Image: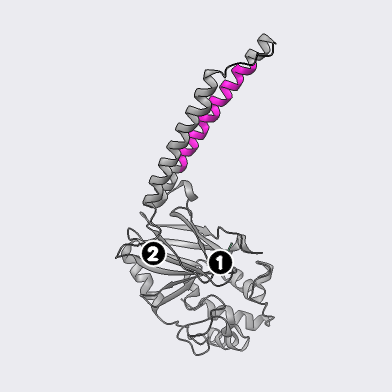
Amino acid sequence: MTNGAFDPQGPIAQDIADLWWLMLALGAAVFVVFAVVLGIGLARGEASNEPEAPGRPNRLVVVFGVGMTSVVLLVVLGATLATMRTVPGRGAPEDALVIEVVGYQYWWEFRYPDHDVVTANEVHLPVGRPVELRLTSADVIHSFWIPELGGKLDLLPNDINTLVLEADEPGEHFSICAEFCGLQHAKMGFVAVVQPAADFVTWLEEQARPATVPSEARAVRGEQVFADAGCASCHRVRGRGAGVDPGAEVKAPDLTHLASRSTLGAATVANRSAELRAWVADPHTVKEGIAMPATDLAPDDLDAVVAYLEGLR
Ligand code: CUA
């Protein structure tokens, strides 16, 4: 994991970070000049101990108050307009990779429409290729933001916002919803994994495969429990018998390759056996108020479901 917006790893993020540093430097300079002038004024006032007679405005006040302020604001305006030109909103390049992003309370769906891939809470991007993100929401307004790649943009219900990003180097970036969207807004995260082109293609191919489940007896029983307990009425597992009708409304994260992801519950906890077991038993102990109910499974059944889910590589 890296250092957020101060560690830009793409051309757009770099431009935004440069603008931010320029504004910080100007703001700091203005503050220092202001503090010095104020200090001098206070010292003089104390020395003379006489109220100044009203008259023509001091030339220094005019020069700094009007002249310098205008110059600083013009410089900031110019730099902002230049940065806005480099941050493309619409009009992605021809070779851009299209990813559809849907925000839900409180998780993310990522679809790669040209590759038949659907996943959740973990988006993979290739290095050095523009990515066209088509953002929308299934419920309220969320906001998409990968701090190291820049370009924060809202996800609106019944509308599509397009964001074009590019990553310069491989890395894993923790990303989070940037618009208050309800009780668990702070736990609506995702992991952005930037990979070299060849690794990305391998990942895409693996994700496009239907689910495979180990033949181990416990995992096989777990799949049955998964169906009987009602999990399969919300979660899709592509290629398995029990599952949601492909045309039905999406209610929960696709679990086809759950075991390949590094986190659970929209980057809330690590994807390990103990956390997975606790999550399936009652996710509200970790993330209160989410749509998934507690399952109330017997310990044996719980173990079986965990074995099944851990087999979904
Ligand atoms: Cu979704 Cu905040």
Question: Which residue type does callout 2 highlight?
Answer: Glu
Asked if labels 1 and 2 touch by Cβ distance under 8 angstroms, the answer is: no
Element at label 1 = loop
Residue under the image location 43 percent in, 47 percent down: 16
Question: Which residue type does callout 1 highlight?
Answer: Ala
Q: Is residue 228 left or right of residue 202?
A: right
Element at label 2 = strand
Q: In the image, residue 253 lies at what x, y percent?
A: 53, 75
Nearest the camera: 117 or 227?
117
Nearest the camera: 51 or 177?
51
Q: Which residue is mark 2?
A: 132
Q: Is residue 293 above or below residue 6?
A: below
Q: Is residue 302 above or below residue 80?
A: below
* Coloring applied to the structure: one colour
Check residue 183 in the rendering and tell me which mark sits there, or answer none. Answer: none
Displayed quadrant of residue 138: bottom right
Displayed quadrant of residue 210: bottom left
Ligand 1 image position (quadrant): bottom right
Q: Is residue 278 left or right of residue 137?
A: right
Q: Which residue is mark 1?
A: 266
Nearest the camera: 189 or 94?
94
